[in-house]
Amino acid sequence: MPGLFDPLKLRGVALRNRIGVSPMCQYSSVDGFVNNWHLVHLGSRAVGGAGLVVTEGTAVVPDGRITPSDLGLWNDAHIAGHRELVRFIAAQGAVPALQLAHAGRKASRVPPWESDPGQTQGRPLTISEGGWQPLGASSIAFDQGYTIPHELSVSGIADIVESFALAAQRAAEAGYEWIEVHGAHGYLLHSFNSPISNKRIDAYGGSLEGRCKITRAVARAIRKVWPDNRVLAFRLSFTDWVDGGWNTDDTVQLARWLKEDGVDLIDVSSGGGVPRPRIPVGPGYQVPGAAAVRQGASIPVAAVGLIDKAEQAEFIVREGSADVVMLAREMLRDPYWPLRAAVELQRCEAARMPVPYNSAWGHLGDFSFDPITAPRITDSGIDRVDGSRRNTLV
Ligand SMILES: Cc1cc2nc3c(=O)[nH]c(=O)nc-3n(C[C@H](O)[C@H](O)[C@H](O)COP(=O)(O)O)c2cc1C
């Protein structure tokens, strides 16, 4: 089995290692535009050596934002900022990835830090404060303090599917190589998939097949417009952690279907669909879900959740539980986690640091001072990183 620092190739995309920066909302955008914060935040994690750098959940329509400060790609005017971000990330040797999202019934909130201290979710944003009416699978609020969503009509569902495809087209223009669709954490697609939040009696509800119809439609619509040599991934919650909710078997079946629809990898997370579930939180607690999907659907997976030690990440990949590991909070604490992990695992030859940082990293281990990892050659023949770190991706 390969290890954490062995490359991974999916379609025409080559990851230099199997470490991903997990998507993390920054709530720092104005009108959905990329700004310097996103460039520095994501750029520094690409400099830090991750193989894959995923943006935060990026809204496909304005109503699909969690807060007014979410990143977006619903307008052609957004493309230029994303292109700049992509160029910088790719120039550091990382694969630039975009998470596409619709918040569904969890939309129209204020950023968490604007709520009462201790809240992890922001309070609802009223219409008079610039909020909007959230949409959902059924007219059921997520929890007390959440607005009751409007149940989406069939034509409204078609519009949302189209919005995902249009955003994917813009993502292709911006130069992203990897799209991850957010189908987890109780947001729109997950709220359709789960029997807890989907009580519809039309073709988009009822059976597992009916509930998953919109998620599959999004996958197929994106695959139609998304270049064949680029990766399409989905993030799924593998369980709602409640009896009668979405579960591992459902996730495996959906992963099989998504594979048929042209999806290349499932990023396996959990929860978010119901308030206050009992979750056995601990190191790597979602890894068994990733392993179950990988085995049950024969599809590459990413594992995420309390993975923060080099040996732990290496073990997850080596034992075949996951093809990629994603780190979120640990990457906030240490953007250079991948470089440190390379030292710890004695895989310095596989790590690449920015040339101007050589003097700082040289004493830490046996880093090769050759700043250039082998250029990543894709099916489209793009040579992104050369000696002068000129980027020719877009
Ligand atoms: C600040 C913050 C923002 C997050 N935003 C997103 C997001 O936009 N999309 C998503 O799928 N998950 C999001 N997550 C979840 C993380 O991607 C990750 O799955 C979770 O934090 C568990 O990984 P960790 O234990 O390494 O932090 C967020 C997590 C944090 C801490």
Image (spheres, rainbow, N blue to C red):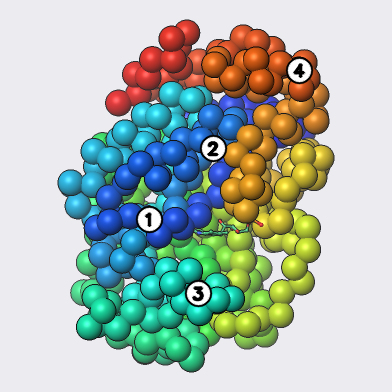
- Element type where label 4 sits in the image: helix
Amino acid at dot 4: His
* CA gap, disc 4 and disc 3: 42 Å
Q: Which residue is mark 4?
A: 363
Is the residue under label 4 in contact with that under label 2 (CB below 8 Å)?
no
Amino acid at dot 3: Gln
* CA gap, disc 4 and disc 1: 36 Å
**Label located before the other in sequence (2 or 3):** 2
Across and down, in percent, residue 307 comes to: 72, 51
Amino acid at dot 1: Ser
Q: Which residue is mark 3?
A: 121
Question: Which residue is found at the position 19% from the left and 52% from the top?
Answer: 75
Closer mark to the observer between disc 2 and disc 4? 4
Is any atom of residue 202 visible in this view?
no
Q: Which residue is mark 2?
A: 45
- Label 2, residues with CA under 10 Å away: few <14, some 14-19, many ≥20: many
Quarter holding the C terminus is top left
* CA gap, disc 2 and disc 4: 21 Å
**Label located before the other in sequence (2 or 4):** 2
Between residue 122 and residue 273, name the one nearer to us.
122
- Element type where label 3 sits in the image: loop
The image quadrant where one finds ligand 1 is bottom right
Q: Mark 4 near ligand 1 (CB under 8 Å)?
A: no
- Label 3, residues with CA under 10 Å away: few <14, some 14-19, many ≥20: some
